[in-house]
Image (spheres, helix red, strand yellow):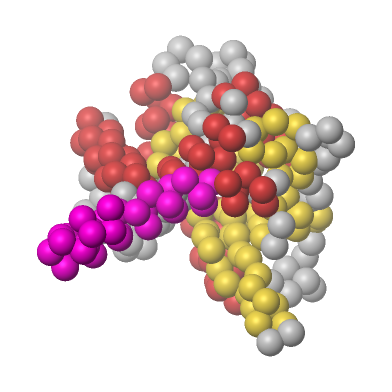
Amino acid sequence: MLETFQELAPSMQIGLILLVLVACAYLLLPLVIKATQKFRADPSLDIFDPEITPIPQAAVEFFESTAREMEQVGFSIVEYVLVPDMVPDVISVVMLFENPMEQDQAIAAVIWGFTEQEDAKKIYIRNDHVEFSTEFDDGSEIGTTNNTVEGAFAPVSHKTLLQFSDIKRPSRLYRVHQRAVEELAAGKKKRRLPPTEQLVEQLKQDLIKEFYDQIATGFLYLDSTQQYYLPTFKGAYLICWKQMWPITSVRRAIRRRRATRLLREWDIDFSGIDSPMSSSDLSRHMER
């Protein structure tokens, strides 16, 4: 076999080596996920004041710009919530919003991780995004987000999640969310938001449910201590493969085509996606 390999042209030898390396990665990396990945079954949610508790400057700037636009379309800040231990070495900070008039809620989230460097932990921002959510009396839900990260879990039947990663302005994303509710939930009655003081607890229950729902899909299971959700072999392989090249690139292209198609069908055209919200946009929201 070695002699056969040596008889190949150098370019074919390199190609074969790369193919073997990719195959090894697809086979072995999921096993690393299986051995190391875990999600807390009862995560901590800590309310904090960003003026007292320091967070990365990038997070501060993201929250400030998001809050200004969210207020323009009828949302008010409920709380700042720290989620420090759902995933090891990853911290999430969530700004929780409510819109009582429309019975919608939203989050602005910044997720960062740590790397060990010279006896110190270096912070790096992994992701920031906004997500709007509307729940209905039949138990279904529509979410609209500008998250740029492709989801790793299996979709669930009761939640429709629309991803428009190119729409950076929260005000414009909310316009898309409202249209999604009109088109995809016609005739459904919105579930009323719980009292403001209960929204943080609902956020926690929503986070827990997101992992619990993956048990039925075969992606996760609850360990014997009842403290962590762990990936099954099926879950480890699919979670890993969905984030690997070229699968993640294909998924991203499909998702963007779907987003473009929906905007076209709904006759929504943002000629300057990253420009500030115009007066016409604002008046359109106020009329709603």
Q: Is residue 237 visible?
A: yes
Magenta-colored stretch includes residue 21? yes
Q: Position of residue 82 (x, y in %)?
A: 74, 57
Image-quadrant location for residue 110 = bottom right
Residue 258 place in picture, x, y as percent:
28, 36
Question: Would you identify the image quadrant in which residue 174 lies?
Answer: top left
Between 56 and 287, the one lying in front of the other is: 56
Q: Which residues are magenta?
A: 1-30
Query: Residue drawn at (34%, 54%), measured in percent from left and top?
Result: 20
Q: Quadrant of residue 85?
A: bottom right
Residue 53 left/right relative to 287 = right
Q: Describe residue 190's horizontal placement relative to residue 275 as left or right.
A: right
Question: Is residue 281 visible in this depiction of the protein?
Answer: no
Residue that appears at 72% across and 38% down: 229
From the viewer's side, name the closer residue of 256 and 37.
Answer: 37
Point out residue 209 in the picture as x, y percentages from the top left corner: 69, 31
Q: Residue furthest left?
A: 9
In which quadrant will I find the C terminus?
top left
74 falls in the magenta region: no
**Magenta stretch: dominant SS?**
helix
Query: Of all residues shown, which one is farthest toward the bottom?
Result: 118
Vertical order, 170 against 227 (above or below): below
**Measuring 52% from the left and 60% from the top, which residue is drawn there?**
127
